[in-house]
Amino acid sequence: MRKLFIVVVVVIVLAIIGGGVWWYMGNSAPETRTTVSYMCADNKSLTATYIEKAGVAPTVGPNGEPVPTGSVALSLSDGRAISLPQTISGSGIRYANTNETFVFWSKGNGAFIEEGATAASTTQTYAGCITVAGDPTGRLPQVYSDPMGGFSIRYPAGYAAAEIIGHNVYAAGEQDMGVTLAIPSSMATGTNLAPDSGVSVQMLQNTPQCDATAFFPDRSDLHSTSVTEGGTTYSFATSSDAGAGNIYEETVYAIPGSNPCIGVHYFVHSMQIGNYPKGMVHAFDRVGLLGQFDIIRRSLTVGQ
């Protein structure tokens, strides 16, 4: 009897230790945290911290399906802070509270939130959310986000953003949409650079093939090349023209496969410096300007 008692005690102790080890492994496993900022429709924004525990296997659902073990911590522009566990999803990544009245979806560079009194009555309260690129250098403090167009881009202080909506400036039937980021006039002061220079993000509807040459409909002689930079492959084309002392330089980085076709368009307008009285102006820093345009372009994020 004494031996049986000792055996039972040992089994219980081992079970407790095993359970403790299992709990410890599940709750103290190394975490991977990834924080992403989003801009949404109606001037809303959110920050999502995605949390994954290394080495923790998914649990099994009622139908034998694996249940994810990740979670997300949300910080919303309305002041709320909400944490949600990851749930089963057929597309994208889904997080929800217990009664399914608050659901956060993310897919690629896009996200949205659904809320309601019941799971059956949820509506989108944060819609069209697009990832915003980070700004580790602090050179691009401003953000333009287009939830309808599905992109966001950062730009320097002093640049002026102006929406482009429905301008028929390209080939017949094309609609040009997006945003123009014009340089601050101070950049042109005292130089031969014109203040209408800048960068634009343009979207072409009904374009059979998203190629940089589509942004130059009047230049059938142009050919595009493929350029890969930072993991992104662009269709690249450039053009220049001159007249009455003006010089126009245009460069387009289009994103093949995007629909509508998205291109980042550089426009540099300058005047022949020889047309000015000697010493009146100095030549603008072309290399520095194009370098700044490159930094702006690299911050472009396109939703999926």
Image: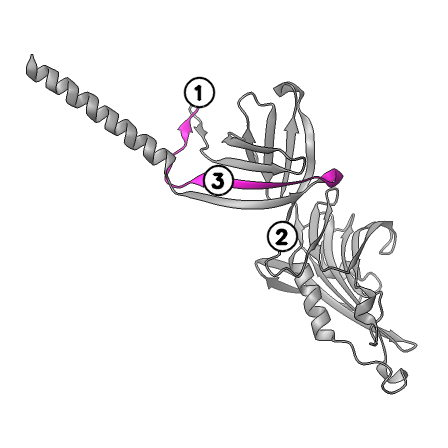
Q: Earlier in the sequence, mark 3 or mark 1?
A: 3
Q: Which mark is residue 133?
A: 2
| Residue under the image location 72 percent in, 53 percent down | 262
- Type of amino acid at the residue the image marks with label 2: Ala
Snapshot colouring: one colour
> Which residue matches tag 1?
62
Q: Which mark is residue 51?
A: 3
Q: Residue furthest top?
A: 1
Q: Nearer the viewer, mark 2 or mark 1?
A: 2
Q: Position of residue 162 (x, y in %)?
A: 82, 53
Q: Residue furthest left?
A: 2
Check the image and report above or below for 94 versus 174.
Answer: above
Q: Which residues are magenta?
A: 41-63
Q: Position of residue 161 (x, y in %)?
A: 79, 54
In front: 76, or 98?
Answer: 76
SS for dot 2: loop
Alpha carbon separation for disc pair 2 and 3 = 19 Å
Specify whether 32 is left or right of 289.
left
- Type of amino acid at the residue the image marks with label 1: Pro
